[in-house]
Amino acid sequence: MKMPCELIAEPYVVKIRKYTTQNLRNKGLTQKEIANLLHISQALVSSYLKTSKEKTQHEPENIFDKVARQVAHEVSETLLVHGQQGIEQAISSVCKTCKLMRAQGPSCALHFMIVPELQKENSICQACHSNQNTVQLLQEDRYHVIRSLQHAVQTMAKIQSISELVPEIGLQFLYSIENPKSNMDVAGFPGRIGKHREKLVRIANPEFAASNHSSKILIEVNKYVQNVRSLITIKTSNKLEDQLSSIGVSYLHLSFDTYSKRKIREKLESQTLSVPIAFLGEPAIGIEAITYLVASNPADIISILEKISSFYQ
């Protein structure tokens, strides 16, 4: 029987130690100084540095790598500034992120693959937290985010003609905590939500860090537009502008999938925007035209989708 902590130990905790070792070495610390600071053997420090040099470009970086690098950077900076006095703060950073990954995050998805009995439709697994109040441990806002997305997608599936709005690549539906900083703060649906014979199809329940690209867009828009916490991707049609105008939703021609980051930021900075708002995308060679609809919460998104879908009935 695989425990969630076992799944995190190698891909997360070990990698944090390895990346922290590499960071400290790059800052000029000797192997001996690093070993003393991290309370590990000098031989292990040498091993971490050796594996770093041997790593090839053919090794893809997964979500555990990305999170481990982020946390290792925080840990390294803490230890460089505070030395041994920063150990407690460094451990706190590691443990906090570990809990978030077990709060409907990437470790949950991996655990479900190994122990599928844990994943239940329309409910949240509490195996890691059976002896504690889940809401308190995982933070109430994150619990609320997951539950809101679950309820919203159930409602969305009942909307007549909703399949007309689903892009060929499927749609992504996101909801974040307040002031999201990374994709660990944004929940979505792994593998997107597709359609089959006019019905919506999804492969998993919502979880944090499920989307990288769309999460970056939500976080970027959040910097310029107040109260943006939810996003959905829908098909850009020839009639969408008129449909949005008729239901009172503002829109802006801004293609996140084809514009440069600089152009996107310049356009966002030059506008006075408020939610809800739709960013109409443009097609390109091999790229489908996608509209990014943003609002304060999933319920507002659903309300707009119901109105747009009514034009196809």
Image (tube, rainbow, N blue to C red):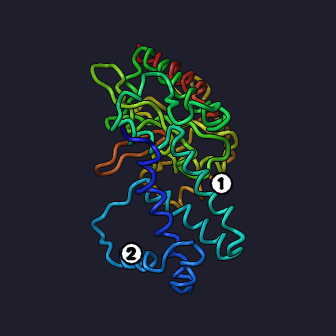
Callout 2 environment at 10 Å: few (<14), some (14 to 19), or many (20+)? few
Using the image, determine if residue 17 lies above or below residue 148: below
**Residue 198 location in percent, x, y?**
32, 19
Callout 1 environment at 10 Å: few (<14), some (14 to 19), or many (20+)? few
145 on left or right of 239 = right
Which comes before the other along the chain, label 1 or label 2?
A: 2
* Residue pictured at 63% horizontal, 71% vertical: 77
| Amino acid type assigned to the residue bearing label 2 in the image | Ser
187 on left or right of 165 = right
* Residue pictured at 54% horizontal, 50% vertical: 98
* Residue pictured at 60% horizontal, 75% vertical: 37
**Residue 2 location in percent, x, y?**
38, 41
Quarter of the image with the C terminus is top left
Q: From the viewer's side, name the closer residue of 288 and 96.
A: 96
How many numbered markers are drawn? 2
Q: Which residue is mark 1?
A: 270
Circle 2: element type: helix
**Residue 116 location in percent, x, y?**
35, 31
Q: From the viewer's side, name the closer residue of 137 and 283.
A: 137
Using the image, determine if residue 252 lies above or below residue 304: below
Q: Which residue is mark 2?
A: 52
**Residue 248 location in percent, x, y?**
62, 26
Using the image, determine if residue 191 lies above or below residue 159: below
Circle 1: element type: loop
- Classify residue 83 by image quadrant: bottom right
- Classify residue 59 by image quadrant: bottom left
18 on left or right of 92 = left
